[in-house]
Amino acid sequence: MGYTDWKDEDRNGRYEEKGSSLKGITTVLAVVAVLLAGTLAYIWWQKSSLVNELNIEKEELTLQMIALQNDYASLSSDYDTINSQLDSSREEVSQLIERIKKTEATNRSMIRKYEKELGTLRSIMRNYIVQIDSLNTLNKRLTADAAAARREAAEVRKQSAELSRTVEDLTSQIAVGSVIKARGLKLEALNSSDKVTDRSSRVKKMIASLALVENDLAERGPIRVYIRVKDPDGILLTNSTQRTFTVAGGEPMICSASREVDYEGKELEMGIYLNEIPSFVKGIYTVEAYTDQAKLGEAELMLR
C-alpha cells in the first residue's frame, strides 16, 4: 500500500467517525424532543383536566345558587317584616348568581368565597322557614282560638237571647198573672128600704156586687173599681160622682160610679152603689166592672 492510499484510507476513517457521532447526537436530540413533547402534553392535559374540573365546580355552584333562588321564591309569609327580609335575601341571591357567572372558574379564591356565601344564604333561608312555620302555627292557633271565641260568643248571645225571651215570657206571664180578677159580679136594684126589688117604679138606687179573687202576684195596696151601668136603651147612667178612667192604655171611658178598696192579695168582697138616678124604666140593665188593668166582667138585671 502506498502513502497516498494510506492517507485516503485515514481520511475516510475520520469521516466515518464523524458521521457516527452526528448520528448519535441526532438520536439523543430526537429522544429529548420526544420526552419534552410528552412532558408538555402531560402538563397541558393536567391543566386542561383542572380547568375542566373547575368549570364543573363553578357550574355546580351556579346550579345550587339557582336552586336556592327557587327555594327563596317559593317562600311566602303573611307578615310584612319577613316579606321585606325575604325580598332582600332574594336580591342578594340574584346578585351572587350574576357575580358567579362573571367570575373565571380558575379564580378559586372567589369560587370558595361564593360557596361560603351560599352556605350563609342557606342558613338564613332555614331560619326563615322556621320563623314562617312558627308564625303559621301561631296564626293557626290564634285563628282557631278566634273561631272558638266567636262560637262561644255566638253561644253566649244565643243563651242570652233565650234568657231574654224567657225573662220576657216570665215577665209577660207575671204581668198577666198579676192582673186582678173578679167573680160573682151581679147588679141589683134597691128600694127606699135598701131591699132588693125588680119593680122599676120602686127602685131608688142600684148596687153592683163582686169579689176580687186572691192573687199572690198582684200588686198590694189601693185599687179603684169602676162600674158602667146602661139602661135598656143603652144609655150610660151617670151622676155627680162620675169620673173618667182608662183601662191598660185604651181609650178613656166615663164610669157610672167607682170605689177604692185596699187590696192585700186576698179575696175581697165589695159593692158599689149607683145613686142619684132620677128614675128607672122597665127593661134589661147591663153593668160592666173594670180596674185600671182590665175588665172584670159584666152582668144584667131585668126590671119590670
Image (cartoon, rainbow, N blue to C red):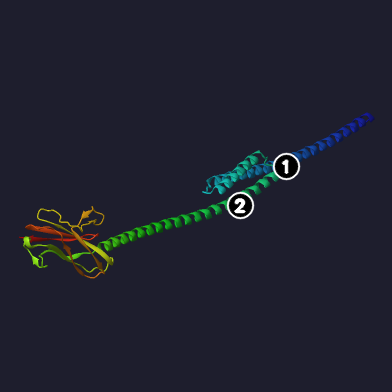
Eye-nearest disc, 2 or 1: 2
**Which residue is located at x 76 percent, y 41 percent?**
35
Residue 289, compared with residue 97, is above or below; it is below
Does residue 208 appear anywhere in the picture? yes
Image quarter where the N terminus lies is top right
At numbered mark 2, what does the secondary structure look like: helix, strand or loop? helix
Residue at label 2?
123
Left or right, residue 152 beside residue 167 = right
At numbered mark 1, what does the secondary structure look like: helix, strand or loop? helix
Q: Position of residue 13 (x, y in %)?
A: 88, 34
Residue 183, compared with residue 28, is above or below; it is below
Q: Position of residue 118 (x, y in %)?
A: 63, 48
Camera-side residue: 142 or 220?
220
**Which residue is located at x 90 percent, y 31 percent?**
11
Q: Position of residue 109 (x, y in %)?
A: 70, 45
- Report the residue that reaches farthest toward the top: 4
Camera-side residue: 301 or 181?
301
- Report the residue that reaches farthest toward the left: 304
**Marker disc for residue 43:** 1
Q: Quadrant of residue 303?
A: bottom left
In the rendered structure, which disc, 2 or 1, sits on the residue that comes first in sequence?
Answer: 1
- Report the residue that reaches farthest toward the right: 3
Mark 1 Cα shell of 10 Å, populated few (<14), some (14-19), many (≥20): few
CB under 8 Å between callouts 2 and 1? no
Does residue 177 appear anywhere in the picture? no
Left or right, residue 2 beside residue 200 = right
Q: Quadrant of residue 4?
A: top right
Q: Quadrant of residue 243?
A: bottom left
